[in-house]
Amino acid sequence: MSDVSPLEMEVAKLIIRTLTLKVDPAQIHPEAPLFGDGLGLDSIDALELSLAISQSYGHQIRSDDPDTVATFASLRSLCQSIEKHRTK
Amino acid sequence: MNSAALLGPYHADRVLAWENGQPMTYGRFLSDVGALADLLPEKPTVINLADDRYRFLVGFAAALVRGQTTLLPPSRAPGALAQIAREYSNSYCLVDGTQHIESLPSYQIPKGTRSPTDSAKVPQIPVDHPAVVAFTSGSTGPPHPHSKTWGSLVAIARSTGARLGLKTSDQMTVVATVPHQHMYGLEASIMLPLQHGMAFHVGRPLFPEDVRLALQNVPSSRMLVTTPLHIRACVTARSPLPPLECMLSATAPLTRSLAKQAETLFHTTVYEVYGFTEAGSLATRRTIDGNSWHVLDGITLHREAAGCSVHAPYLRGPIPFPDLVSLQEPYRFVLHGRGEDLVNIGGHRGSLSDLSQKLNEIEGVQDGVFFLPDDTGTSVTRLIAFVVAPGKGAEHILSALRTVIDPVFLPRPLHLVPCLPRNETGKLTRDALLGLMQDLQKKERHGI
């Protein structure tokens, strides 16, 4: 997993901690879908995760922002969005 | 036959719906309904999958005009939709996007096909027409249908509006975070505005920032129809919401402290509505005032040998509460939690025995059970499953489950175990399952 950035590893840990998932952070493939078939997350998780992200990085996630339509598509897209909008 | 109008006071140029800051008027709505009603097939039942609240309502109203019944599937999981489609095979599907049901013919809900006329007549719908069928999951077999008459939907909308002090002159706009295919969403975000000359926002905001933008994109005065989950998110995010007349919450109990925080932070009044699928909304409270619920006008409560029941002129007979309640006076009651089998995860109600049965129907599963651990108070408590399935991986079982149950009920985690701690009569007690969970957690901590 050499292609995982430090931020991706940090956010993977945040996801696991926030959603009490039973996976190893290294098992979250950065380009695998977070929802549906991937980690199987749902909209309650998205809401919980958005709060954790706003608290940790000051990024308020919106679902209608054209840039962030794909935010939750994968760990990598989520991290790109955090990188772009973070205030902390 | 008695009938009730499709909508409350009618003014053709009053706004019914807001989409991206663009108004759609009641006049336009009636012409859209008329146009669609002419196109619908001759079938008794319809599954309306429209995501857009306005299009859903156009489809729902056109079906009413044609004397048809809208089915409200218990979830959008493909397996759940397919099951309803099998039970009601002479149905069709109304859609506004790409989701459809394989076995049923689909019709797109158009918008603005005819130009609105000022002289449109408001349709009258017979009060005993079965307007919708909602479903609850029972302990065995397929979901149980509950038919709702048009008269009951209208009566509940009017009594809820009266309780909240809504006046048609207020021209309030509803923004809702809940789906309109759900009884609470249908009652509070469709029927309530429709019967009071109010407007709604067509979308369904999820994140606090979505909620803020949706509220900002509609004129005052505003009402947020939502759940404890979304209220907690908005409070935690300290969203700078625009002026908000009131919030209405349902699907799960709201704590007094969270309601107080929301009232202070957003300078609003937080009401809760209590109901269940079989009876519809039946009581309200202002959460900070205390834990007792005040029943809506027209409803009476009765204590019976087996528990309490709800009576109303629009219900066919007394309906027992699924929750444990104690009556305080004829029109007030206090809730004391749910029966053991019922769970509520993020507003979705399910039955543990029904979920366990679906788990046991999966190929390769020899024994399995769903379990709700104690509430930790921090975030939404999720279900756990213990499964005996030699040679099968957790992923195989999870992907099979995903097709038959609502995703909120997916176990987190799913533990594969060699056997379940059944007692000599074959029963699984809560204590035995709690013990199993603690053993597994201990082993995990020690890296076994």
Image (tube, helix red, strand yellow):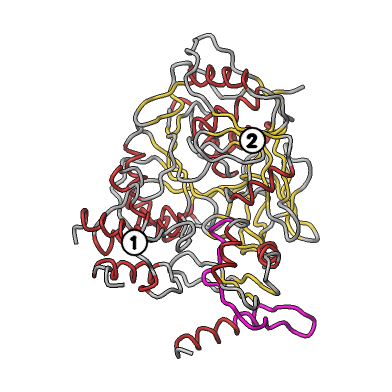
Q: Residue at x 64, y 81 (%)?
A: B431
- Spot occupied by residue B177 in the image (x, y as percentages of width and height): 45, 45
Chain of residue at mark 1: A
Foreground residue, B42 or B429?
Answer: B42
Q: Are discs 2 and 1 less than 8 Å apart at CB? A: no
Q: Residue at x 41, y 53 (%)?
A: B231
Q: Secondary structure at mark 2?
A: helix
Q: Is residue B416 magenta?
A: yes
Q: Which residue has dot 1 on it?
A: A75
Q: Which residue has dot 2 on it?
A: B153
| Type of amino acid at the residue the image marks with label 2 | Leu
Q: CA distance from mark 2 to mark 1?
A: 44 Å
Q: Residue at x 56, y 38 (%)?
A: B49
Q: Secondary structure at mark 1?
A: helix
Foreground residue, B130 or A14?
Answer: A14
| Type of amino acid at the residue the image marks with label 1 | Leu
Q: Which residues are magenta?
A: B406-434
- Is disc 2 surrounded by few (<14), some (14 to 19) or many (20+) residues within 10 Å? many
